[in-house]
Each structure stands twice: as C-alpha cells, then as structure tokens.
Image (cartoon, rainbow, N blue to C red):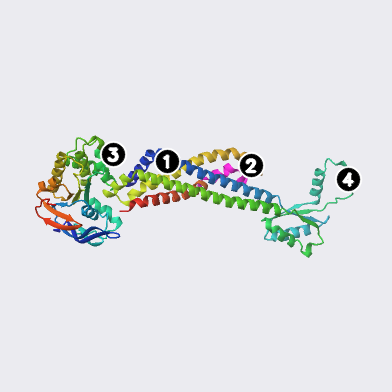
Amino acid sequence: MSDTMIHFENVSKIYPPDSVGVRNINLRIKPGEFVSVIGQSGTGKTTLVRLLIAEERPSHGKVSIGGWDITRIKDRDVPGLRRQIGVVFQDFKLLPQKTVWENAAFALEVAGVSPKRIQSTVPQVLKIVGLENKMHRYPRQLSGGEQQRVAIARSLVHRPKVLVADEPTGNLDSLNTREIMDLLLKINEFGTTVLLVTHNREVVNALHRRVVTLDGGRVVSDQEVGRYYL
Amino acid sequence: MISLYRICKFAFKDFWRNIWLSFVTTSILALAFLSINVLFVLNLLAHNAITAVEERVDVSVYLVPGTSEEVIKTIRSYLLAQQHVKEVQLTSSDEALQKFRERHADNPAILHSLDTLDKNPLGPSLSVRARAPEDYVAIMRALENPAFASAIVEKNYDDHRVVIEHIQSIATQVERGALAISVLFLLIAILIVFNSIRVAIYTHREEIGIMKLVGASNFFIRMPFVVEGVSFCILGLLIAAALVLPGIRFLSPTVMEYFGGGGSADLFGYYKTHAFQIFGAQLLGGVILTAAASGIAVGKYLRR
C-alpha cells in the first residue's frame, strides 16, 4: 500500500484572466490521516476540494489520490473517482422530497448498485451516524446536525478511502458541531482519511491533529499537531 | 437492467412531477403529428385524383370498316410491342354498332337511319392505354407507321395533358407544402420539447448536482431526460393516431365514392395496411429528434 493517499505536487489553479485559486501547493497526506485545512475566506480552501473531486483541473502541477493521477482525469472516469471520495458540504445538499433512507440510498441507486446491496449497506451507515431510528424522516423533520449526519451517511455508502468535509459545521450550533466532529473522528478511526476544510477556530484547536494553513492560495504552515493561529 | 429500471423510474416520476408541462409538451407534439397526418392524407388524395384522371385517358384508333382480323391482330401486336403501351382493347364492328345503338336509344331518327343501311357502317376500333400520361405522344407517333396508314381511318387522343399537368402541379405543391409545414411543425415541436426538458432539468438542478457529487455517470444523469422526451413523443403520437384513425374512418366512404373506390382511395384500408410504416416512420423520426433535443438540453448540466 502506498504511503500517500492525497498528493498535491506544485499545484496551481488560476482562473482566467489572472485570479489565483491556489498557487504552488505541495501537500502529502498519508492514508488514515485527519488533516484540517484552515484559512480565511478566499484563501483557496474550496479550490483544493474542487481539485480533489475533479470539479476543476489544475492549471499546473499534479494531483493524485491513492496513487491515481487525476490531474487530467477523463470525464468518463470522474464518477469512479467520486465514488472513492465522500464529500460533505456546509449546506448538506440533501434531497428534501426523499427520506433519510432514500437520501443515503440515492448514492447507491445512481451508481447502479443492486437493491440487495442497498438493503444491507444503508442500515449500516445509518447506524454509524446514529440515525437508524430516524430513517423514515424527511430532512425538514431533522435538526441541522442530523441533516449533516445524513449527508455523511450518504458519503460513506461507497466506503470511500477519503472523506472530504468542506465547512461541515458552518451551519451548526456548538452542540451539533461537537457531534459532527466526533463522528468524523470515529470515521477516521475506521481508517478513512479525513480532510476537514474549516475556518472554525474551536474545532481545529480541539482536534489536536495535523493543520495545514492556507493564505493567499499558498500553504503558509503545515503542523503535525496544529492550532488555529490566523 | 437495474439501471434501466431506475432511469425509467426517474423519468416517469419527473413526468408526473411536472404534469402540466408534460401535458402541454405532449399536446404540441400530438398537434405536430396530427398536422403531418392531415398533410399526408391530402397528398394521398392528390395522387388519387391524378390516377383517376390518368385512368380515363386513352388513344382511340378507328379502323376502316371491314378491316381483316389479321390486320387488326398485326396492329394490336405492333402496339403492344411498344414499351409505352400498357394495354390495347379491341372493339369489333358489331360491338361498336351495339354501343352506338345503346347510346342513341332515345333517338328514333338515328336508329331509323341505321336500319335503312344494308351493312354496318362502323369499323372496329382499338383503345390504347399508355403506361404514363407523357407516353401518349410517342404512341401517336408510332401510329404514324405507313404500314397501317391504309387501315386507320382516324386516331384521336383527348388531350388530358393539361388537366393532368395541372393536377400534378397541385400535387407537387401539396407535397412540397406538406413537407415544409411538417418540418416547421416538427421544428416547433422539437423546440418545445427542448424547452420542456430544460425546465425539467432546471427543477432538478439540485438533484443533478447531487447525482454528480455521489458518482452518477453522465449516461445515468442524461437518460431519464431522454426517456422523458421520448415518452412525450410516443404519447403525442398515440393521441394523434387516436384522432386520425376515427377521422379517416369517417371520411373514407365519401372519398371512395368520389374516386370510384379501390387502391389508396380506401383511406382507412390504406392506413390499416400501412399503419406500421406510416406511424412507424413518424415514431422513429419523432423519437430520434426528441431524444436528440433532450440529450442536447441536458448536456449543459453535465459539465464537471
């Protein structure tokens, strides 16, 4: 097994004409690591996420995941990549007309997974996120934290190698924030590499994990056990 | 197989979710198909009119009374050997006289005059039918053959060319008009399908974004919209067929009576025998166009 799960090599993303997303990013993340990427708004955190899930292509440099060079990934290979990376966002991105179960199952349905496997996988992930008793509720009947847990459950159904969480606690109160962070740590303990993108000082300081700080699209600090110092 | 089932499920869910939009799109497509069928029927009737006139055209060749059987046979064989000749019918002197008497049965003066004659004054005649209206000139030319000059008293050709050309010109114009209007209607229908799918996609943009996020293939995202577009088309055609067939059934006897029946004058019979080709071609054309329109409409949303 490779000792690198995520690798950014001299990666720059320039949006025409000359707006910098990220510049000369060199970042190596090991399998099973929990890394927080911090920085103020507009420092390139979301660009990193978009590069990882192949929503954007780098202008320069190379991006690889689990040894797979995705720098110039073909369109037809993008769905395969996204099934290997779970992604959760601040706004949850749940389908309001679907229940908790259906939202989680949706990721498997669109991937052509058999009903039998869906029946066995969905309860497992809902149990991991603690929503096994609310699987028939609709998103509007859940708290913000619970909605985020549904999004995490959906991101886990493909058993991804990497979980990318882009500001997952941005819309949550402190209690729900702690619950979500505990869940992300639990998922990390199962061996999933977690990349947390946030600007929440308390969250980062409480984690005592690796912290990569971005400023102006560049990595300005990379600490094994870091703190939010911006 | 599972994917196909899910694609259809998503497509039909969307069809119901935007039921008014689906209704309007299907109605427009039904109108487009209806107009195509009406124009097709008009075209069919124009061709019927031409055939009816063509069938009434012939060249009559009147022979000298008392022309021998052998000469008649030779002229007949000569004419049948011409590539433009479809058929030659002989009317003998006796038959000609009988027909003449029948025609003038209510005119005693003519009948009396005939009785005063000691022999049949009418000669045999040949009725020549050409394969195509434009062939009559060639047939008339063939009859100029000096070998038969002494046996032929008169040959005449009721020149229906002007009528035929007129009908042909109308038929061509109908055909062209039908084609142009059908294309126009289809284009309008396609634009409407395109827009309906775009609206459907707009209402689904969030779902599409999530589908892409969780690793759905572009094929899986695109296909429900293509299936939805194709369903509009199939439903539209079914509605059009449900209106066209009873309409034709109702009109068919009148048309048959007018054109003397048979062939494509039996519109309903013609539609019944050619239903597979007529509706099959419309279905194929419609499905290809709506599938393409839907596929293109969703294309924009499939970029990364």
* Residues at marks 2 and 3, CA–CA distance in whole angstroms: 61 Å
Q: Residue at x 45, y 40 (%)?
A: B24
Q: Residues within 10 Å of mark 1 (few under 14, many from 20)?
A: many
From the top left corner, tell me how far across and down residue A222 is, in percent. 12, 56
Can you give x and y, in whole percent of width and height, for residue A148 in the image?
21, 42
Q: Earlier in the sequence, mark 2 or mark 4?
A: 4
Q: Respond whether the residues carrying marks 1 and 3 are from the same subunit.
A: no
Q: Quadrant of the N terminus of chain A?
A: bottom left
Q: Is label 1 or label 2 in front?
A: 1
The chain letter for the residue carrying disc 1 is B
Q: How far separated are the C-alphas under marks 1 and 2?
A: 39 Å
Within 10 angstroms of label 4, few (less than 14), some, or many (20 or more) residues?
few
Marks 4/3: CA–CA distance: 103 Å
Q: Which residues are magenta?
A: B261-276
The residue that mark 4 highlights is B115
Please name the amino acid that badge 4 sits on: Asp
Nearer to us: label 1 or label 3: 3
Q: Name the mark nearer the viewer: 4 or 1.
A: 1
Discs 2, 4: same chain: yes
Query: Which residue is located at x 10 percent, y 46 percent?
Result: A206
* Callout 4: chain: B
Q: Which residue is mark 3?
A: A96
Which residue ends up furthest to the right in the rendered image? B116
Q: In the image, residue B152 lies at what x, y percent?
A: 80, 58
Of residues B108 and A90, the one drawn nearer to the viewer in this rendering: A90
From the image, tell me which residue sits under label 1: B22
Say which of marks 2 and 4 sits in front: 2
Q: Secondary structure at mark 4?
A: helix
Mark before the other along the chain sequence, 1 or 2:
1
